Amino acid sequence: MTTTASLIAILKDELKAAHLTYADLAAKLKISESSVKRMLARADMPLSRIDAICHVLKIDFTELARRVAESQPLLAELSLAQEKSLVVDKKLLLVAICVLSQWTMEQILAVYRLTEADVVRHLAQLDRIGIIELRPLNRYRLKLAKTFRWRPNGPLMEFFRENALLDYFSGGFDREAEALILVHGSIGKSVAPALLERLQRVAQDFAHQHQTDQKLAPHHRQGYTLLLAMRSWDYEVFEKFRR
């Protein structure tokens, strides 16, 4: 649904909630009922008229804009152009990863050697790219769905494959609450999607716990990186033995 269509839908809902008909609205706006019907049907409405309708319905325009923004579909995947714009600017990518974990600007400044101006500028860039909706006092709303993922073999997956995987797996996985688990086997094709869905729920649980524990003092929290994957794959070193 487009932004304009979402706006009209919200206004129609508010009209019903206020128990007002098109005729009632037309009378309050001092225009014909047919004009009201045409505007709401075609979404052909100047900003001044929207403001007038908000006044009739006793809705704050800022609140209306917020509701329209939150009604837009969340992104399950970035476009190729969006990913490329993140990869070319490492500071922007760092801030993007932080907002994916829903860090505040204060948390970013406390952990990384970035200036406040750096973070503000990059938050504004992420807003323009479409990853967040920037709000007053440098707060933001993520515009990504819970099922969000990087593009398969896209710029960001390639970046992390080249710059992060070896570093990640070079660890001993021998500290408290660390583990490296590799399981290989054959399962029914119909079962695989259900297992993948369970893995996605684990990732969502991890993200939710991160959010919940932000209220804890820093010395009671420990940073972890959860890496989940499932694919049809065999060890490359054994390929030469295949029939």
Image (cartoon, rainbow, N blue to C red):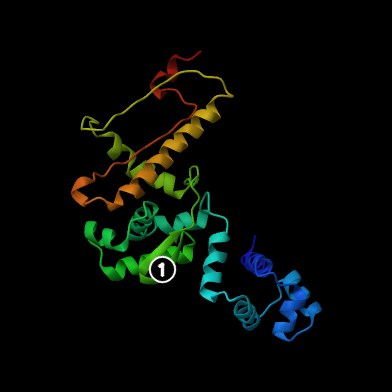
- Count the marks: 1
Task: Give how far across and how far down residue 223 sits, in percent.
Answer: 26, 44
Judge from the rendering whether residue 16 lies leftward or rightward of residue 104; answer left or right: right
Q: Residues within 10 Å of mark 1 (few under 14, many from 20)?
A: some
Task: Tell me: residue 46, above or below residue 86.
Answer: below
In the rendered image, the residue lying farthest to the right is 34
Q: Secondary structure at mark 1?
A: helix
**Quadrant location of the N terminus?**
bottom right
Q: Residue at x 56, y 70 (%)?
A: 64
- Residue on which disc 1 sits: 124
- Residue at image location 41% in from the left, 68% down from the top: 124
Picture layout, residue 214 above or below residue 67: above
Residue 167: quarter of image: top left
Specify the quadrant of the image occupied by residue 104.
bottom left
Residue found farthest to the left: 219
Residue at 50 percent of width and 42 percent of height: 152
Residue drawn at x 65%, y 66% is 17
Nearer-the-camera pick, 83 or 1? 1
Residue 106 left/right relative to 206: left
Position above or below: 210 against 46? above
Please state which of residues 173 and 194 is positioned toward the viewer in this rendering. 194
